[in-house]
Image (cartoon, coloured by chain):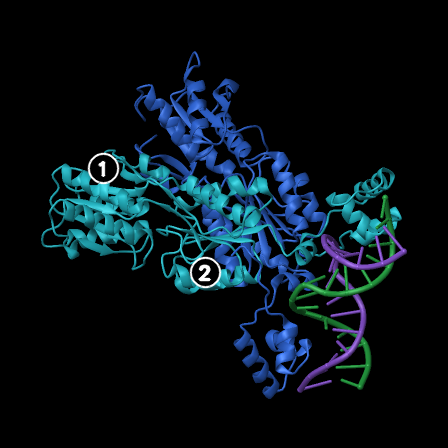
Chain colours: A cyan, B blue, C purple, D green
Amino acid sequence: MGLRRKHVTIAEVAARAGVSPTTVSHVLSGRRHVAEATRAQVLAVVEELQYRPNELARSMVTQRTSTIALIIPDITNPFYPAVARGLQDVLTPAGYYGIVCNTDGDPAIERRTVEQMVHRRVDGIGFAGYYQHQSTVAPALAAGIPVVLFGSRDARRGIDAVTANDLGGAESATRYLLDRGYERIGFVTGPAGDGPPALRVTGYRRALRAAGRRPDPKLVVRAPFSRDGGAAGMAELLALPRPPRAVLCTNDVVAIGAMDEARRRGLRIPEDVAVVGFDDIDAASLAYPALSTVAVPAREEGRACGRLLLHRLTDEPQQPPQAVSFDCTLVPRDSA
Amino acid sequence: MGLRRKHVTIAEVAARAGVSPTTVSHVLSGRRHVAEATRAQVLAVVEELQYRPNELARSMVTQRTSTIALIIPDITNPFYPAVARGLQDVLTPAGYYGIVCNTDGDPAIERRTVEQMVHRRVDGIGFAGYYQHQSTVAPALAAGIPVVLFGSRDARRGIDAVTANDLGGAESATRYLLDRGYERIGFVTGPAGDGPPALRVTGYRRALRAAGRRPDPKLVVRAPFSRDGGAAGMAELLALPRPPRAVLCTNDVVAIGAMDEARRRGLRIPEDVAVVGFDDIDAASLAYPALSTVAVPAREEGRACGRLLLHRLTDEPQQPPQAVSFDCTLVPRDSA
DNA sequence: ATGAAAGCGCTAACAA
DNA sequence: TTGTTAGCGCTTTCAT
């Protein structure tokens, strides 16, 4: 164990079967006709020796690794496993495997990871980052490796994109709160960036303006994308001279943290503060009170990403970039 | 895009720098001394051409891919992302990347996946399956690829293992229920298997016997490892002539499904049925009522798996197999 | 201090 | 219908 054993090679199979490696290769790939007798003989030896081609060697010559990289902030945020599963839903049947990389949203790590994946010659990349999307994935594009961006508003500079209507979702959530009479609405967003979180803030502002209010910058606070971050954001909001009575959060994990904090302070939800999240992860419906949220079809997004990648990899690599967008739907529950 | 561009090769760098590929290789790896002037010259060209070695080619000769496969039932069950993250906590700094494979607990898929990973020459495998562990990973062992089994009671036949004290955890949860006066305690487990779920049932039975009761086989029902499965299991239990007043579930996702079903039938938790889960995923504390559960340190397990693998990969590959076990702790909350 | 040459295991022209 | 010959791009003896 831990000791590399010698693997059976195509040459050994060939020798044993009394044919050339080429013939063995062709029997296995079916890429050219082989006499039935030869075929049977080769197959027998393959079976006897339990031969399987070394994928690495094959990749060297075919220049394809059948590997896709999924680069995300944190697999521990339940939104991403759903995306990952969706991706695999479509990629696995096509023979691809996925390398999952966590970046914690750190631009330096994102960049390093993209480069590593290029050097590893992955066939495609699904990238969910919050910063400088275009430049981060540049090495991949330069190498001709298809990239699908998550959360980019639209496809550009030759990059496919999968996105949810973050802006519209945030807008309707805000409108919903406005309609229920909330005057001051806070927003807990993540660190500065230009991805979906930014769009969600924009939607929030837009709804406010549409209702004739001017967004108060103090009501938008930044916090890490985590349960603790949500708590910190809520704390910051509640420390305001005139704290908001309703708080929109950039995602459910953050919203759950915000509820933690409110509860810690003895505030009732939604009577004292209403909370609305984003994503509709499983935990949202389990939370108490059940979290009102804007549902984003994560698994569907993953599937779309897979399809887009597959399309570039097989059908017509040269088509213009495509953007697939999904609608977000407000799921009113008990927290608002 | 989607069009493979030519990558810079070591030969081009060498030519441009007026040295041999050997020298370039050594400058980059530092594996042999190179005159300072030569070194500088090579580095300059590397920078100019933005050269990075093709990892595939490197793997061909070094026989190492710096890739670890994590084979699990379903990344969508929050227990596994935590494991995955733990694995990466220790593997990423060591330069390894992880391929994540979902098997849905299907033995045929598990087998296929292990084989694929062997053909891809991953350097190590973390395997969480529920069936025939030993034989499923046999191809990896035969190839000398280190494997760490999740949930195996102990290391054997040369396989390292990471496990939680499933048996003890189930035992104490059962005892807890017994102590609180519950007479008939049901158990919703998964499909037949010999992994952690089986141990949990064993622990449950053992606690029952220790308390002088004889386990009623009718009270143990099998259901898929999913929220819906949990609901089905609970339904089956409640359909019994004398339904249990407390139900232990093989994991939190199943427990949450069981609560769904109880609620659907208008039963109060814990007054009418008490429910206890296993794992302590994030959602457990969010559920309403907050789910009492047996905490399993998923991320720690992932880290241990990574350490074990790293150990085989670097230090002393030939040491006897090790088993790392973690304690499970009962987390009493409101559902029981 | 550096280079030449072999080869990791496979596929794909090109021949026969 | 099958085989011979080149590599894919790198690392690593073995020489010098």
Give the residue number, with chain letter if any, for mark 2: A137
Helix, strand or loop for disc 2: loop
Helix, strand or loop for disc 1: loop
Position of residue A163 in the picture relative to residue B127 (left or right):
left
Subunit ID for the residue under disc 1? A
Of residues B74 and B86, the one drawn nearer to the viewer in this rendering: B74
Give the residue number, with chain letter if any, for mark 1: A335
**Residue A181 in sight from this viewpoint:** yes
Residue B180, given in percent of the width and then of the height, sits at 35, 27
Q: Is residue A246 above or below residue B260?
A: below
Residue A103, given in percent of the width and then of the height, sits at 43, 57
Q: Nearer the viewer, mark 2 or mark 1?
A: 2
| Numbered marks: total | 2
Residue type of the residue flagged with mark 2: Val
Q: Residue at x 50, y 28 (%)?
A: B224
Q: Separation of disc 2 and disc 1 at Cα?
A: 38 Å
Residue type of the residue flagged with mark 1: Ser
Q: Are marks 2 and 1 on the same chain?
A: yes
Q: Going from the N terminus, do you reach mark 2 or mark 1 first?
A: 2
Residue B103, given in percent of the width and then of the height, sits at 56, 38
Q: Quadrant of the C terminus of chain A?
A: top left
The answer to which quarter of the image holds residue A274 is top left
**Residue B298 in sight from this viewpoint:** no
Residue furthest to the top: B241
Q: Residue at x 41, y 17 (%)?
A: B238
Q: Residues within 10 Å of mark 1 (few under 14, many from 20)?
A: many
Residue A21, given in percent of the width and then of the height, sits at 81, 52
Q: Which mark is residue B113?
A: none
